[in-house]
Image (cartoon, rainbow, N blue to C red):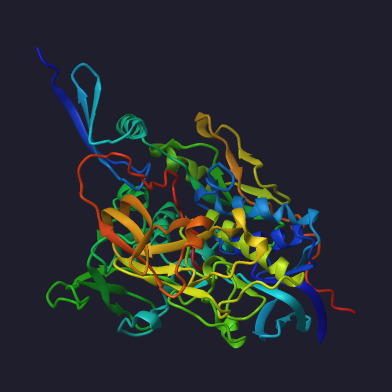
Amino acid sequence: MSDEIEKQKVVTCVICPNSCTITVSQMKSGELVLEGNQCKRGEQYGKDEFTNPKRMLATTVRIKNAYIPLVPVRTSVAVPKGKLNEILDLLARIEVEAPIKCGDVIVENVLGLDANVIATRSLDVDTCNVIACELTE
Amino acid sequence: MIEKECDVAVIGAGPAGLAAATEADKAGCKVMMIDRDDGLGGILQQCIHPGFGLIEFKEEMAGPEYAQRYIDMLPNTNIEVVKGTMVLDMTSDKEIYAINEQGIVKIVAKSIVLAMGCRERTRGAIKIPGYRPTGVYTAGTAQRFVNIEGFMPGTKFVILGSGDIGMIMARRLTWEGAKVQAVVEILPFPSGLVRNKVQCLDDYGIPLYLSHTVVRVHGRDRVTGITIAKVDDAWKPIPGSEIFFDCDTLLLSVGLIPENEVSKKAGVKLGKTNGPEVNQFLQTNIDGIFAAGNVLQVHDLVDNVSAEARKAGRMAAMSAAGTKIPNLNDGDSVPLVAGNGIGYVLPTKINMAIPDEFVGESGLVKLSLRVKKPVNDQYLKVKNGETEIYKKAFKYMRPSEMILFELKPEVLSGIDASQSLEVFLEPKEVETTEETTEEVTEESAESTEGGE
């Protein structure tokens, strides 16, 4: 008896400019069968897109005592797409204080997803050795 | 008036300026880097999305992280950083006049690297009819508001232009709680990367209207809606195809223009890209004035900006130290011509009288180009007169991706300087996949096309 298709999804691969249209079929046996991808990485992407699509989240959180009101942050790794809104809500309620160093962990293991939210900019540290022209000569 | 002197003056402290300045500093020059912003990093600071650095740093990072890598190098250099200072004028004698809170600053340099980047096309540049209400912004301005200054410019958006920045802003605004009604593109294909269409628009069910444009902005004081219409092959709106969207804000993501007002004042000749014409040494028609980054040509990858700017920094340092580097007009130059399918190609000219300093590795000539429209299975060829001197197969070529390639010194030495060099596309017979060099950028390729 041949395995029947139970569920099917068409995804566009975003790994490279090739942009393969991949048809992912889940068979009755649970096996995922891919069609249309041209490489191994596309295979992984297709499977992830079918089972648990992931995205990296990049946004901002409020910062006190810096020369701008926001510090940019991102998740250290891609997180499940369905969790993005929940993370955004959480980050909207957070405020940090300068100085912040690029790479500082803002939220550890966010929502238990094995990803940290990290700062992507240093703020309120002198970013250069000489600032502006000396006025008095 | 404050007066300063330096070997190399770098105008702009974005990715191009940072790379050029650090490179010139390495060569032992006294370097001044001038920027109008109070922070360093330029537009990278507002490009908070990931996708940068895969080539330069072998990891995926956000725009500010990429900038931070360079900014963190500065304390170990002798670069004098002049922030909050706007360059207003420049002469062919390499005198720079700038203004800041303290007044006018005059900087006399031995050589200059132009690294001012580009700015966005505005509504005026694309002639959209209607009133002039509040609520029409360029995408990059909105990006700066949302990502740096903490303002939302509206609640319901229509975005004109499907460049990467427009699509990235569609996602960003959605994440910040806004409703993006539509992204509208006059071309029959998305002008940004497909991966951005997928992860920025499709993920959020934002419709993309191809071959459509904005025909009316409604509202007198504030935008109250946008009417779009389908366009024909000549980009003329087709009557009867209008669609109205209720919105309070229109974002324009309709292209970038290299910012060369100051270059023009010094008599720098501009070319097809709206950037300076340069030869393979990135030198303009004026001795000692070099250009790199988006002021020269709009790049898709910041990593390539850094590489280009390092070269400009190195050349500027050599020039400041007294080495004569051929300028655009110096003799023995062969012009590069953009042939079939090619939008533009740089450098403008290749100088054949290559100084001894540039034999071997540094004698390589790097060419960059963009194709006019998306094509598959092509040969990219270079012809000197009737002689083919370069050929490479490509499976995919997209206008959104800059193509870079090199001509080796041995190829260059065989060039007949009395004949021009034509760069063009030739369709390839499609069949087996033999030894095609697939030019596929595996990395995600968000751009510095962040616009401002």
**Residue A35, how many percent across, how many down?**
22, 32
Judging depth in this view, the residue of B297 and B13 nearest the camera is B297
Question: Residue B41: in sight, yes or no?
Answer: no
Number of residue marks: 0
**Residue B392, how many percent across, how many down?**
36, 52
Judging depth in this view, the residue of B154 and B363 nearest the camera is B363
**Residue B237, how many percent across, how many down?**
19, 77
Q: Quadrant of the N terminus of chain B?
A: bottom right
Whether residue A82 is situated above or below residue B369 in the rendered picture: above
Residue drawn 58% across the image and 69% down it: B282
| Drawn side of residue B69 relative to residue B410, left or right | right
Judging depth in this view, the residue of A34 and A57 nearest the camera is A34
Whether residue B436 is situated above or below residue B166 in the rendered picture: above
Asked which quadrant contains residue A55, the reply is top left
User: Outermost residue, left direction?
Assistant: A1
Residue drawn 28% across the image and 73% down it: B226
User: Outermost residue, right direction?
Assistant: A137
Question: Residue B70: in sight, yes or no?
Answer: yes
Residue drawn 61% across the image and 54% down it: B360
| Drawn side of residue B6 relative to residue B245, left or right | right
**Residue B428, how many percent across, how many down?**
24, 52
| Drawn side of residue B322 relative to residue B155, left or right | right
